Amino acid sequence: MNSASLIDQQANLTLSGLACEFARSLRPLLRRALGGTSTGCVQVDRAGKRRLIRYFAYMVLAVSDALLRADRSDLPTDDERVAIPEGLCPREWRVTDLFRNIEQVQRCLKEEVRAYFSPVSTTVDVHMRAHEIVERTFRAIIEAAIEVQLARQAADVSAAQDRLQKALAALQHTEERLRVATSAAGIGIFEWRGSSRSGVWENRQMYQITGQPEEQGPLTAEQFMALVHPADVDLLLSHFRSSLMSAQHVHVAFRLSRVTDRALRTVEMFGHFRSFVEEDDYIFIGSLSDVTERADAEAKLKDADRRKDIFLATLAHELRNPLAPVRNAAHLLGHDAGNDPAKREWLRNVIERQTGHLAHLIDDLLDVSRITTGKIELRREAFDIRQAVDHALEMTTAAALQRHHDIVRLPLDDPAYIDGDPSRIAQIFSNVLDNAIKYTDHGGRVVVRAAVVDRQVCVTISDTGTGITADALPHVFDLFVQGSGHGEESRGGLGIGLSVCKTLTEMHGGTIAARSEGRNKGSEFEIRLPISEAGKHEAAHESNGLERRSSARLPILIVDDNVDVAMSLAMILDKHDIRTAHSGEEALQIAETFEPRLVFLDLGLPGISGYEVARRLRARQASSRHLEIVAVSGYGQPEDKVRSASAGCDGHLIKPVDVEALLAVVSRIAASSPSN
């Protein structure tokens, strides 16, 4: 080759020509560069190859652009920067592999530069400038890649810090909510270390539950176990051992004595074991709740349930007891015993006494129902307390004589008036007397004293009976409590009489108290009631409930669907003109021609009810003739009496009817009769 052609060839080898050569041979150049790349940073798949090709093409074009600018005397300076398009550097690429791939492309371009200038045998400046441009451009590319990586790392660190801050804030909020919740619920939380058997941490509620001073730090395992009730130590330890072996949660309730005041509390523990770094060591994380009130309530419920079962069994027993002699008496009256006047009278007394006992049991049950529902009402009036004491003694005399008791009465010399319900006050005294008679053995003594002390009437009923033990004494007025507290069987009754006495006494503004020195030392009940101002005035009219009886013969209609009830009442009132009816229709038909002066009317009639019968009788009543209607019903609540009165009834008697009360009604009407 001559010198002229060589000079022409050198003139054609320019930087712009090199840039054009790069563009013309871009595809084979990229394939060669791709063949020598490091693919350890990415998964070599179609998408990965496309990303590498785009990145390699970007570098080749950056060098070509620098060559073109240099050919126009616009050389890049050392501080010129290269901007890498977004997405050319995937986040999953490692920095070392990225730089190795950049170096591979740079090597391929340098080889391409050498090949481009190889036809020239001598080194020229343009060749050197081409290598310099390639070096500077790749240095700028590397710096840009480093900046991208640093920016990504900074963004990652910032994002991680943000996530950490959010996590810490969320943890702080969770801990705050947990503190509020545990504080509101009174839950103690603690952490124990197994190897040292020491408390690692406790919250404030834990200190309050155990009574441990907070400044003394958490309790050790030994200190905590020393607080546990001796009877519950084995229970707690067995739960710990079984849970530790089975990796199950601990859930156990036990009793412990607080550190400060030694108060016995019932607590409930939840917790679980967590393995620790050291071998054969663990952390126990648990919670402790004071459930004393709940445990006491559960114990009371169990006791109430037990007493309820006893009460139901006692009720069945007490209801059957009077039925046996009544049935026997009824059998004997139908045979030879009915012909003997003495036996007949004895059997009549048996039936009367036993049915009275049944009525007393039913009254007690109704009183408990009225008291628990708040429906009991007092019919207050000013009366002499001595009347109530006398009435109570009359009601219990038969039972005292049967047991051969000596009843001693130490009465008031002067009247003492109280404002109350005479029948309810008499019920209080009779219930206490009945209790004293039952729990005093045959031949014992019952003393009734009455005195005025500090503007109060004090009635004391004492006996020489079985007495009351010290542990049973605080519970004698509880519902369904029976017996003397010595473990002996009940001597009758439902265990509700004294509870009713306490409620009725307190409703009258008074107090009732029980005293006893123990087994076989007898007992004493003291009832105190406030004196009424009415006592300063003239004594009220006294009455024993029996009105002056008249010999006037009254037309009386007895209406009851129970034939036995109707016929037995007719026999009691056989001195009067009696008609009986067993339905509402029959009663109305009889009343049209009979014109009764007094009607004893059962309210629960079939067909036409007693209420409707009363209304129709009132509608037919002649203005010149007075008719008195007395309701007879097994329902005696205040609302029942209001309903019967609204239907036109003048009175309301409760089944089984007190014969004396019935006769008093008849006597009162007979006494007011014009024919008398």
Image (cartoon, rainbow, N blue to C red):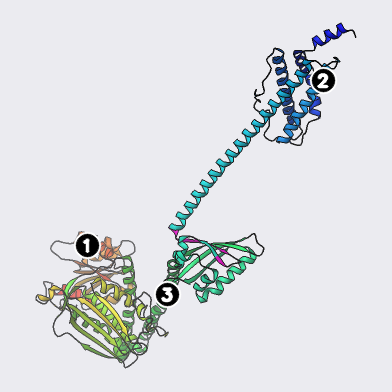
Label 1 belongs to which residue?
Answer: 648
Q: Nearer the viewer, mark 1 or mark 3?
A: 3
Type of amino acid under label 2: Arg
Residue in view at x 57 percent, y 41 percent: 161
Residue in view at x 72 percent, y 32 percent: 98
N-term-proximal mark, 2 vs 1 = 2
Q: Secondary structure at mark 1?
A: loop
- Horizontal and vertical percent for residue 215? 45, 64
- Horizontal and vertical percent for residue 340? 32, 91
Please tell me how crowded label 3 is: few (under 14), some (14-19), or many (20+) other residues with Cα within 10 Å: some
Magenta-drawn segment: 184-198
Q: Quadrant of residue 535?
A: bottom left
Type of amino acid under label 3: Arg
Q: Quadrant of residue 564?
A: bottom left
Q: In the image, which disc is placed on residue 114? A: 2
Please tell me how crowded label 1 is: few (under 14), some (14-19), or many (20+) other residues with Cα within 10 Å: many
Label pair 2/1, CB-CB below 8 angstroms: no
Up-down relation of residue 131 to residue 290 (above or below):
above
Q: Nearer the viewer, mark 2 or mark 1?
A: 2
